Amino acid sequence: MNSMSSEKLEELRKKNIEERRRFVKLWAEYVRNHEDEEWSRQQNTVIDSQFE
């Protein structure tokens, strides 16, 4: 069984955190630059699709 080293796990954890922060910043920028109705409608589409 191959297990990851603690260094590799830490590297993956840091990469994950960076990706999440990038996405949050991207989404915040999008929300600031688009009308509420537009991004709200898009979010509703995503949320509603989870119920199908």
Image (tube, rainbow, N blue to C red):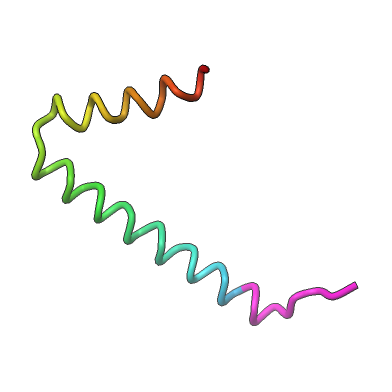
Say which quarter of the image contains residue 40. Answer: top left
Residue 18 in percent (x, y) is at 40, 66
Note whether 2 is above or below 17 in the view shown.
below
Viewer-side residue, 45 vs 9 = 45
Q: Residue at x 25, y 47 (%)?
A: 27
Q: Residue at x 69, y 78 (%)?
A: 6
Figure disc tally: 0
In the displayed image of the protein, which residue is found farthest to the right?
1
Range drawn in magenta? 1-9
Residue 51 in percent (x, y) is at 51, 18
**Magenta segment includes 43:** no
Residue 24 in percent (x, y) is at 31, 52
Note whether 33 is above or below 43 in the view shown.
below
Residue 23 in percent (x, y) is at 33, 55
| Position of residue 12 in the picture relative to residue 4 (left or right) | left
Note whether 11 is above or below 17 in the view shown.
below
| Position of residue 27 in the picture relative to residue 3 (left or right) | left
Say which quarter of the image contains residue 26. Answer: bottom left
Looking at the rendered image, the quarter that the N terminus falls into is bottom right
Q: Residue at x 8, y 44 (%)?
A: 33
| Position of residue 51 in the picture relative to residue 31 (left or right) | right
